[in-house]
Amino acid sequence: MRRLDASEPGFAAAFDALVNDRRESTSDVSADVAAIIARVKAEGDSALADYTAKFDRFDLDASGWSISKAECAAAYDALGPELRDALNLAADRIRAYHAAQLPEDRDYRDAAGARLGARWNAVDAAGVYVPGGRAAYPSSVLMNIIPAKVAGVGRIVMMTPTPGGEVNPVVMAAAHIGGVDEIWRIGGAQAVAALAYGTDRIAPVDVVTGPGNAWVAEAKRQVYGVVGIDMVAGPSEIVVVADNRNAPHVIAADLLSQAEHDPTSQSILFTDDAAFGEAVAAAVAEVIPTLATARTMEASWADNGAVIVVSTLAEAIPLCDRLAPEHLELAVDADVADALFAKVRHAGSVFLGRHTPEAIGDYVAGPNHVLPTGRRARFSSGLSVGDFMKRTSFLALDESALAAIGPAAVALAGAEGLPAHALSVQNRLN
């Protein structure tokens, strides 16, 4: 992992390299994905069956294309009470947080007497992609389905690969809690194509959300415009800003909480104490071999980890903004965390104080854990109810309101060389 010191010559260039490091797939998958999408559009279900046999090693016709609501309910009933209660607690908190995001309609009259406003409606159908490869995440099921439900989406479709035909029962239970309408045992770029364009079995949707591998991310990029998408997500990221009043092994675990996702994940520590930074690095080295995800964490930390020493923690915040991380932990006293947070401009989600590990946000906190990666927090936000809704504006003028603002419209239409626009307004003014 990298060791950087903001006071040393060459730091600016080294930090630039860290910021600009591309951890997303280096292989060009766009042509492969385009071919998959084209084939699904042309051949529909037969293409889905062929790709599933090739990549997930089972026969959809023999094993079944979908998972029923009854199967999901049975999986929920079979859960142990501790896990069932944990999923329900998570769902309740996610639902409450996202219900507070519901936008309000507007309907008012301005000084000219014009009636203006906007009305919000949910999309008719949403598709949720749930990974099933390296790991299966019931938490992602809840984080994607519940905001769609809160928004009022009428039909929610879940796509999840089931490698070897094996279905994850906890994912099924989470789908039951979330209230999904359809579950199809299909993954990869072909699942995204089916959601966007539809097949004989699967009706198309209006929005596609959810994380996935490089092929899924590229497929979402390519179908955007046919459907809406939440974002194009890349490898996970965490930045921790911590002082030496933290226990090194605690901060080490925070850094590894994202490193264990994938070898391309990134974990960065900013501290104002070089000795503490070294203690955390030593703790990371000690913890990695003790955990089942050791191989993934070791690669991630070695290739993408960093400990950065700054003179003051306040100095770290502009550097964090340049990274625009998916997750930002401010592991300091509450008042210091608030002061630092006030200066943060770019982060997917921020975790304040010594007792707020990022991992709590992955499960039960309430805010969505589907967040922008790859510095996209500079211009985008985490998944929300708004991703499943659209706004329709409206306008109503009476004769006096048109008289007040119409002549300006005529003048502007003339300036733009659009005489029919001008005539449409002028006819009513006359």
Image: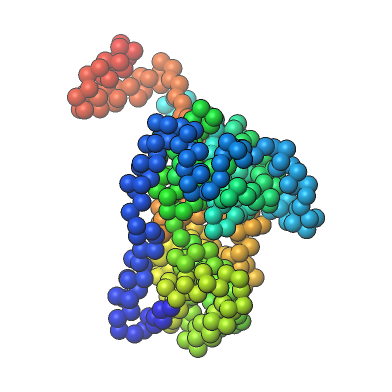
Q: Position of residue 349 (x, y in %)?
A: 53, 59
174 on left or right of 85: left
**Looking at the image, which is closer to me, 335 or 290?**
290
Task: Give the quadrant of the C terminus.
Answer: top left
Between 79 and 362, the one lying in front of the other is 79
- Location of residue 124 in the rendering, given as x and y in whole percent from the top left corner: 54, 30
User: Is 1 placed left or right of 60 in the picture?
Assistant: left
Report the number of numbered marks: 0
- Give the residue drawn at x 35%, y 67%: 21
Quadrant placement of the N terminus: bottom left
Q: Is residue 416 above or below residue 65?
A: above
Q: Residue at x 44, y 17 (%)?
A: 398
On the question of residue 400 being in view, the answer is: yes
Q: Position of residue 265 (x, y in %)?
A: 47, 65
At a point 39% along the width and 63% down the height, the residue shown is: 23
Instruction: Name the side, left or right, on which 70 lies relative to 239.
Output: right
